[in-house]
């Protein structure tokens, strides 16, 4: 029989969000917790994405925890290998290994209203927890479009997040589907070795130069010996991005100058006017994520590369057919088509107080109070939840703000005492969401004239935060108990007393309204 374990807190996932939560729990003096991870090691998206050229588009000193600075970043924009090593280092430095339960994929978690706890089933045993912190992340499950004929393709097919390192691309005819952040790193990395590379582009991205360089030995020495210099460096990087926010959220027309710089970047590498036209976006810069690369455009200009300005529509045998009818024979199809972001894959596995899943609650769009808690799901919160993403800065800043909220949430439960739970009021969730969506209307992500992965099936942006990271930190500094309902478990009768009538079952739960 599989072992059952009860803990105060169960953290789901071991990427930046999950490890950050684990570190914060220990720093709060909480050691009764587990981190449930479906893979055999930590790292989240930086473990799963190991494709050629994989790197971060946020500067290294900003894309790291404030409580775990790394003076030895090798480059201003670090690659996947170094970021994953950093997360392993954080795991060891803060004593997280004993809390890890690797190869434990959560298959179901259901709220037990009688006991006020979560019952969790995994592929390697069962758990129960007073509180669940879901940190599965939006970039965890690859998304491959449903393409007619794909199942019968005789060649090799894989997603960028599931790269097959045993497969040799040398001399192969390769179709690259998608032009997002992964694709612009993959294309220049594989172009020199493949026989022919066909890029199937649905919408061209805006690409700016990547101001990347090696961080010198003296710089790293200075950051080790005088840590305040690394803190100052991080602060400058943060401040620059904070100043940029208003252009994205309030005054998108101010981005016109940056668009001209981006077009000049295209012109420097792409001399063919027809190709340049195919690579020039028709929407406002910033509507989709701005990408950084010095090698993408030069790679597309090489003689063994074709750019088809039309998405993949069908596969016929070993022929890929674009929406404009263009046919190309290929040996390999690589999808750089992103992830399940607005339809969180963990949602169908989370069963709330009313017996319905989180996916059912969110069928019309994701929404959570302060990006953390959902109505109908007591003592459950998510890290990198709805409307907590960023279009121009470091997600680590948002994660740390949500960790502040998590820590105060647990403090409030301690203050309440006994067996208690906090349930987000539907009215509070609705008020927060309406406010966020109202602010979203004038942002470049809604008014910029594009369709992006930020938008859900109903056209709502349930992904990004329409403000500064400083503002979000203020909004999540503490838990406002007026936004929650306090649930208390029924008192259990002594063995010599009969259970009073009307105190059985779910009706025994009492609700304490906090005004």
Image (spheres, rainbow, N blue to C red):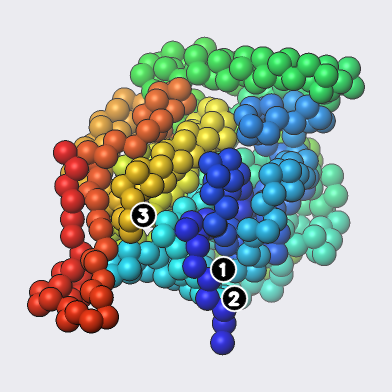
Question: Residue at point 55% right, 15% down?
Answer: 239
Q: Label 1 belongs to which residue?
A: 105
Do labels 1 and 3 touch, CB within 8 Å?
no
Above or below, 35 against 241 in this view is below
Residue under label 3: 379
Residue matched to label 2: 124
Kindly report which numbered mark, 3 or 2, lies closer to the viewer in this rendering: 3
Residue lying at the far bottom in this picture: please name it.
1
Q: How many labels were placed on the picture?
A: 3
Q: What's the distance in space between the residues labelled 1 and 3, CA to CA?
A: 20 Å
Q: Residues within 10 Å of mark 3 (few under 14, many from 20)?
A: many
Q: CA distance from mark 3 to mark 2?
A: 23 Å
Extreme residue toward the left, this view: 501
Q: Residues within 10 Å of mark 1 (few under 14, many from 20)?
A: some
Is 105 situated above or below 198?
below
Residue placed most toward the observer, 423 or 242: 423
- Name the residue rendered at 47%, 26% in the picture: 469
């Amino acid at each position: 029989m599989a072992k059952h374990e009860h803990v105060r807190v169960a953290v789901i996932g071991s990427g930046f969000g999950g490890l950050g939560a684990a570190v914060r729990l220990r720093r709060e003096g909480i050691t009764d917790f587990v981190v449930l991870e479906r893979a055999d090691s930590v790292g989240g998206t930086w473990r799963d994405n190991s494709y050629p050229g994989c790197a971060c588009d946020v500067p290294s000193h900003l894309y790291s925890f404030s409580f775990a600075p790394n003076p030895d970043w090798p480059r201003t924009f670090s690659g996947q290998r170094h970021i994953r090593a950093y997360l392993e280092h954080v795991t060891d430095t803060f004593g997280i290994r004993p809390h890890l339960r690797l190869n434990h994929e959560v298959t179901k978690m259901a709220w037990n209203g009688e006991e006020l706890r979560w019952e969790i089933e995994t592929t390697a045993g069962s758990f129960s927890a007073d509180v669940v912190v879901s940190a599965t992340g939006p970039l965890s499950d690859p998304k491959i479009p449903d393409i007619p004929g794909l199942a019968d393709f005789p060649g090799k097919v894989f997603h960028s997040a599931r790269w097959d390192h045993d497969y040799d691309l040398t001399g192969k005819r390769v179709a690259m589907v998608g032009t997002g952040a992964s694709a612009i790193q993959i294309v220049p990395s594989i172009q020199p070795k493949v026989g022919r590379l066909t890029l199937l582009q649905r919408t061209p991205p805006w690409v700016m130069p990547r101001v990347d360089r090696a961080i010198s030995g003296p710089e790293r020495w200075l950051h080790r010996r005088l840590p305040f210099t690394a803190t100052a460096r991080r602060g400058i990087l943060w401040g620059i991005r904070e100043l940029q926010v208003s252009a994205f959220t309030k005054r998108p027309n101010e981005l016109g100058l940056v668009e001209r710089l981006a077009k000049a970047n295209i012109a420097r590498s792409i001399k063919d006017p027809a190709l340049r036209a195919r690579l020039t976006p028709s929407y406002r810069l910033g509507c989709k994520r701005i990408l950084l690369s010095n090698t993408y455009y030069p790679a597309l200009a090489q003689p063994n590369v074709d750019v088809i300005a039309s998405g993949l529509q069908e596969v016929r045998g070993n022929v890929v057919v674009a929406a404009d009818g263009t046919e190309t024979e290929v040996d390999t199809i690589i999808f750089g088509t992103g992830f399940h972001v607005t339809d969180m894959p963990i949602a169908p596995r989370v069963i709330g107080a009313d017996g319905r899943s989180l996916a059912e609650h969110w069928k019309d769009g994701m929404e959570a109070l302060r990006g953390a808690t959902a109505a109908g799901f007591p003592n459950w919160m998510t890290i990198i939840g709805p409307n907590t993403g960023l279009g121009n800065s470091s997600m680590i800043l948002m994660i740390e703000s949500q960790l502040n909220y998590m820590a105060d949430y647990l403090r409030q439960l301690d203050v309440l005492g006994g067996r208690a739970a906090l349930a987000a009021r539907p009215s509070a969730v609705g008020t927060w969401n309406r406010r966020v969506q109202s602010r979203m209307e004038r942002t470049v992500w809604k008014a910029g004239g594009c369709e992006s992965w930020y938008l859900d099936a109903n056209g709502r942006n349930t992904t990004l935060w329409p403000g500064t990271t400083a503002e979000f930190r203020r909004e999540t500094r503490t838990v406002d108990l007026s936004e929650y309902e306090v649930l208390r478990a029924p008192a259990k009768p002594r063995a010599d007393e009969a259970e009073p009538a009307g105190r059985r079952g779910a009706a025994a739960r009492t609700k304490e309204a906090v005004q």
